[in-house]
Image (spheres, grey):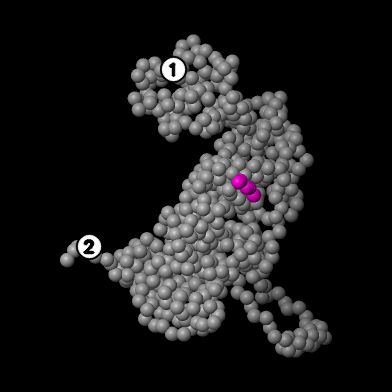
């Protein structure tokens, strides 16, 4: 008998579960995506112990008849694709037919489903049907996954804490809510509501329910289109940043995916608007022909391949950059005031009691009796419990997208039932591009900050960041068009020595280096000499600049002229600008502000730091208690 044999279906399903069912969030993802594909408009998710004890998902989708319900737990059973041609035009979230069989093989599952004409009730344990009987006729599906990984203790052993697993599920549900604003989602954990959306198709309201109204107010919408793709979405203003790229949500034809190059294009769009290692909040929607996408490249369908990728990346970067450039504004100094509770007055038991007015007391009692009689004849409205803060549900170390950082209930001070019914009108108004204010110089602080004023308050200007922005735009223009007539010959040529493999890279990229003003001549096998440089290189720092530019080429192994020019402009502007503790005359400060006023983007330095901050007259008066 041969050694090779075909595994039985039960064993192959458990192996497949190792790829599909990584943690409770994986189960929620597969089942909620099935509910979305079924045309649901309402999806409720109930978790016990982060899903390790129980996961219940109820939807109002199309449901299944008895025959479909039974066959759905067979491996590779699907209603999404029927022939090879369908694989290249997938518009549904699920299509492989592995999820139900894989999940059922490592759990105890209950399925109640109906298409409105007949109902089915199934109980499965370890992938095998234990109970089969007719079910209720409520259209839709109610599926419960209990004791996940009960028959795979090794997998259960490596589950993280309840808080960590819950954090993954909250993050996932927030992405699904953003990708499907037309569906009303609810997520409850141990009876506590963690997420609720109204399903009205308004992305702005979903953003507000996830990030809080305060942050959602500072997000602006954008739209763009090329021959093959349409993009839309919302991006945060540069003043709203996060320390992680996890706050960028990307949806391709309704599917939430992760794509490194798209994230990079978004970050590049914010170039010089954000500080280093700070990232925006983004919800990006990409629509295109399914033939241009390949979603069958990852077991959990998290990754995707895109055709005509350079065209799409350019569209994303240019559209978002243009939107940010038009709405950028001076950062406003916001003072968070502490809520001071009034002191409780101590009861003075020695104070004599006031004299009782008997006539007035009788009138009050009579009036109360009348009110009580009216109330007893009416039906009282039930008390709606206020949702509790979600912040306690997740560890501080976990930083997914959602509710954990800003509690929308605290921001709006309204219960969810009221908030969800009210449109977030303020999000529709996008701030207009703000001109640089006409400032009058008052003085200087510590040789570092310029103080200026105008009618609406005063401004603090970082003199180094201001001149850095001015010099950056000057050098960016110069580096962009290196003029042969603007070369300065060196009295003593500069010599650079490198390893043989590094010299090979430099030879291949000599033209790119010349495009940014670095003119290398071979000087032996692995040495180069520079005899001239552009006359606008900062004096005395020519060798350091050339070494830095060469180092960038060696690091990336391939030179990108656009990026090299950008890096050269930033580097030279930083080295050439005024430093801190450098005192200026009033004329020099006036000239600096006038040059800054003429800059394309006078509000941030090339590294994304703010150039000036505005203190309104009202805020100053509040600090001095002139207004209350």
Residue with the mark numbered 2: 4
Q: Is residue 214 above or below residue 446?
A: below
Q: Is residue 331 above or below residue 20?
A: above
Asked if the residues shown at circle 1 and circle 2 are in contact, with their CB atoms under 8 angstroms apart, the answer is: no
**Residue 513, image x, y percentages:** 49, 25
Residue 475, visible in the rendered structure: no
499 is higher (above) or lower (below) than 18 = above
Q: Determine the secondary structure under disc 1.
A: strand
Judge whether 134 appears above or below 196 on screen: below
Viewer-side residue, 251 vs 305: 305
Q: Nearer the viewer, residue 246 or 334?
A: 246
Is residue 21 visible to the viewer in this orientation of the structure? Answer: yes
* Count of numbered circles in the view: 2
Give neighbour class at mark 2: few <14, some 14-19, many 20+ (Cα, 10 Å).
few
Tell me the distance, in whole angstroms, between the alpha carbons under discs 1 and 2. Answer: 64 Å
Query: Regarding mark 2 in the picture, which secondary structure is present there?
Result: loop
x 64%, y 80%: residue? 382
Q: What x and y, as percent, mark residue 275?
A: 55, 41
Corner quadrant of residue 410? bottom right
Check the image and name the residue furthest to the top.
491
- Neighbours of disc 1 within 10 Å: few (<14), some (14-19), many (20+): some
- Say if the magenta span includes residue 423: no
Residue position for label 1: 521
The region drawn magenta spans: 223-227
Q: Which residue is rendered at x = 55% and y = 45% of the image?
A: 312
Give the residue displayed 61% in from the left and 64% down from the top: 182
Which numbered dot is residue 349?
none
| Mark 1 or mark 2, earlier in chain | 2
């Amino acid at each position: 008998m041969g050694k090779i044999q075909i595994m039985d279906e039960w064993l192959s399903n458990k192996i497949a579960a190792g790829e599909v069912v990584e943690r409770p969030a994986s189960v929620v993802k597969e089942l909620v995506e099935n509910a979305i594909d079924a045309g649901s408009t309402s999806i409720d998710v109930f978790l016990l112990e982060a899903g390790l004890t129980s996961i219940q998902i109820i939807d109002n989708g199309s449901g299944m008849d008895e025959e479909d319900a039974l066959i759905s737990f067979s491996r590779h059973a699907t209603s999404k694709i029927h022939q090879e041609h369908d694989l290249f035009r997938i518009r549904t979230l699920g299509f492989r037919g592995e999820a139900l069989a894989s999940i059922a093989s490592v759990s105890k599952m209950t399925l109640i489903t109906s298409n409105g004409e007949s109902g089915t009730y199934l109980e499965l344990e370890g992938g095998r049907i234990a109970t089969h009987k007719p079910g209720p006729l409520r259209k839709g599906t109610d599926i419960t996954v209990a004791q996940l990984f009960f028959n795979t203790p090794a997998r259960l052993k490596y589950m993280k804490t309840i808080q960590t697993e819950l954090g993954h599920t909250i993050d996932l549900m927030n992405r699904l809510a953003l990708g499907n604003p037309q569906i009303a989602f609810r997520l409850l954990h141990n009876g506590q509501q963690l997420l609720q959306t109204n399903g009205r198709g308004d992305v702005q309201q979903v953003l507000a329910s996830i990030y809080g109204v305060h942050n959602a107010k500072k997000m602006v919408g954008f739209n763009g289109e090329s021959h093959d793709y349409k993009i839309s979405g919302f991006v945060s203003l540069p003043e709203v940043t996060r320390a992680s790229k996890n706050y960028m949500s990307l949806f391709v034809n309704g599917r939430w995916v992760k794509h490194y190059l798209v994230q990079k294009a978004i970050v590049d769009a914010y170039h010089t608007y954000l500080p280093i290692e700070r990232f925006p909040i983004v919800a990006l929607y990409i629509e295109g022909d399914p033939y241009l996408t390949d979603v069958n490249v990852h077991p959990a369908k998290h990754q995707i391949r895109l055709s005509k990728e350079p065209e799409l990346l350019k569209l994303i970067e240019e559209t978002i950059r243009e939107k940010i450039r038009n709405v950028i504004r001076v950062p406003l100094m916001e003072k968070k005031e502490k809520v001071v509770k009034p002191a409780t007055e101590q009861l003075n038991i020695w104070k004599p009691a006031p004299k009782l007015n008997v006539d007035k007391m009788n009138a009050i009692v009579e009036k109360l009796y009348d009110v009580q009689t009216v109330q007893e004849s009416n039906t009282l409205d039930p008390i709606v419990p206020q949702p509790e803060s979600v912040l306690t549900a997740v560890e501080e170390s976990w930083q997914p997208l959602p509710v954990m950082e800003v509690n929308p209930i605290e921001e709006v001070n309204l219960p969810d039932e009221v908030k969800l019914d009210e449109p977030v009108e303020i999000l529709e108004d996008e701030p207009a591009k703000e001109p640089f204010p006409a400032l009058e110089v008052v003085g200087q602080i510590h040789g570092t900050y310029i103080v200026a004023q105008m009618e609406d308050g005063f401004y603090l200007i970082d003199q180094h960041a201001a001149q850095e922005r001015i010099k950056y735009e000057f050098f960016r223009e110069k580096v962009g068009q290196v003029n042969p007539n603007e070369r300065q010959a060196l009295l003593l040529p500069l010599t650079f020595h490198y390893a043989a493999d590094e010299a090979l890279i430099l030879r291949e990229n000599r033209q790119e280096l010349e495009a940014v003003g670095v003119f290398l001549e071979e000087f032996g096998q692995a040495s180069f000499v520079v005899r001239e440089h552009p006359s606008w290189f900062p004096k005395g720092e020519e060798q350091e600049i050339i070494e830095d530019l060469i180092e960038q080429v060696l690091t990336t192994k391939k030179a990108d002229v656009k990026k090299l020019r950008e890096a050269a402009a930033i580097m030279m502007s930083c080295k050439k600008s005024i430093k801190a503790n450098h005192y200026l005359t009033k004329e020099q400060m006036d000239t600096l502000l006038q040059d800054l006023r003429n800059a394309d983007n006078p509000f941030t330095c090339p590294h994304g730091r703010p150039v000036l901050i505005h203190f309104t007259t009202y805020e100053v008066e509040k600090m001095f208690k002139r207004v209350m």
